[in-house]
Image (cartoon, helix red, strand yellow):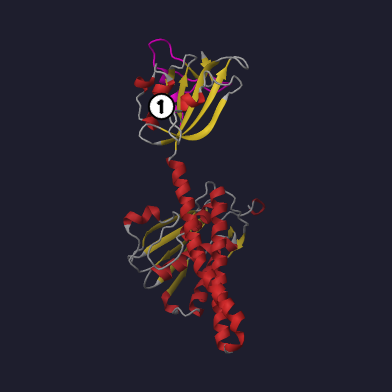
Amino acid sequence: MSVAGTSTAPEGGDARHTPLPRQGDHAGLDPDQLPDGLVVADEQGRVTCFNAAAARITAVRPADALGQSLEKALPLEDLEGRRWWQLTDPYGGLAIRVRQPERNLLLPGGREVLVSARYVRDAPLGPVRCVVVSLRDTEARRRTERSHAELIATVAHELRSPLTSVKGFTATLLAKWERFTDDQKRLMLETVDADADRVTRLIAELLDISRIDSGRLEVRRQPVDIGAAVSRHIQAYVAAGQSAGRFLLRIEQPLPALWADPDKIDQVLSNLIENAVRHGEGTVTIDVTPSASPREGEETGTSVTVSDEGPGIPEESMNRVFTRFWRGSKRGGTGLGLYIVKGIVEAHGGTITVGRAPVGGAEFRFTLPVAAPAYLA
């Protein structure tokens, strides 16, 4: 009997390796090739298929499950400790029921697993001929939920400080305006303005993360003078009090014409240079050079390398630099900047890497394709 994408094995055969039936022009598929656990029981409730993913998730050997009753091979309980198959009664329950929606259930030992089921009938209201059960490990979902929870906690923490400051200063000014000098009022308002900017930046980061995670980060390409963009960032740091001798900008000419989103490239440069200034030491060197394009079919691209002379990034942390909440030091920050940088660079079709600079500090290098519009090709 071939049912719902699987079939029973001939007597004496191994049901795990019975290929799925051919549909259209697609070749049959071995159940062991499925990414999710697949368990199939026949009309008597005996297990006829128990694939490799099901064995991995349940820690039950297929040889021990095949031929057993579904309830014995897959002894599931709900979160209240009730036996799932007795509760749902797939073979003796409502004749109109054809499925069980996905939900969290417990395996022996308390391990959670996501379970959904399909009841296959030869005719509406007829007896159940086959029960097809899908199993999924909850670990990936738990990691996502933990990541979301950590993001919310980080945002709440980062928002609390500036908003408390804004509320405190504005309330004080409103209540005691006449008691303060003009200089005191200006200082309070400048603090409120800086804290409002901090909140605005954090909200912008959250929006960027949402768009990156959902694949909806828009790139509005325009001609970009990458050398001039780097110069503007250096000038801003010098105007804010950094020594001009702290920065070294080297531009290799000729550079290919670069089409990119200028605002997002500014965001990338801002994050990388700020990291070098805040977490690094010595001279911050920015090299802008032509390079091979990371995009297939294009010959040229543009690379920007930002390096410093600080302690660098430990080798064991290199693979976590572009993940959420990674912080290279305890000098503040949300740990979201480099995650956003990587998302922006990749949205442009580019690549970004991290390594150790020749002088021992951290070195970030991103490469963008020139991405010229078709009408200029």
Residue 373: percent from left, percent from top:
64, 53
Residue drawn 38% across and 66% down? 330
Residue drawn 40% across and 32% down? 107
Q: Relative to 168, say whether 293 is above or below.
A: above
Most foreground residue, 109 or 213: 109
Q: Is residue 377 left or right of residue 319?
A: right
Q: Is residue 13 magenta?
A: yes
Quadrant of residue 317 in the image?
A: bottom left
Secondary structure of residue under mark 1: loop
Quadrant of residue 113 in the image?
A: top left
Most foreground residue, 285 or 133: 133
Q: Relative to 298, say whether 63 is above or below.
A: above
Q: Is residue 312 left or right of residue 267?
A: left
Residue 292: percent from left, percent from top:
48, 53
Q: Relative to 361, say whether 76 is above or below.
A: above
Amino acid on which the number 1 mark rests in the picture: Pro
Q: State the residue lying farthest toward the top.
A: 11
Most foreground residue, 234 or 142: 142
State the count of labels: 1
Q: Is residue 250 visible?
A: yes
**Stretch of the chain drawn in magenta:** 8-35
Q: Is residue 194 visible?
A: no
For mark 1, what is the residue?
75
Residue 215: percent from left, percent from top:
57, 48
Quadrant of residue 192 in the image?
A: bottom right
Residue drawn 43% across and 14% down? 9
Packing grade of label 1 (10 A; few <14, some 14-19, many >=20) is some
**Prevailing secondary structure class for the magenta stretch in the rendered image:** loop
Q: State the residue lying farthest toward the right.
A: 375
Residue 247: percent from left, percent from top:
44, 74
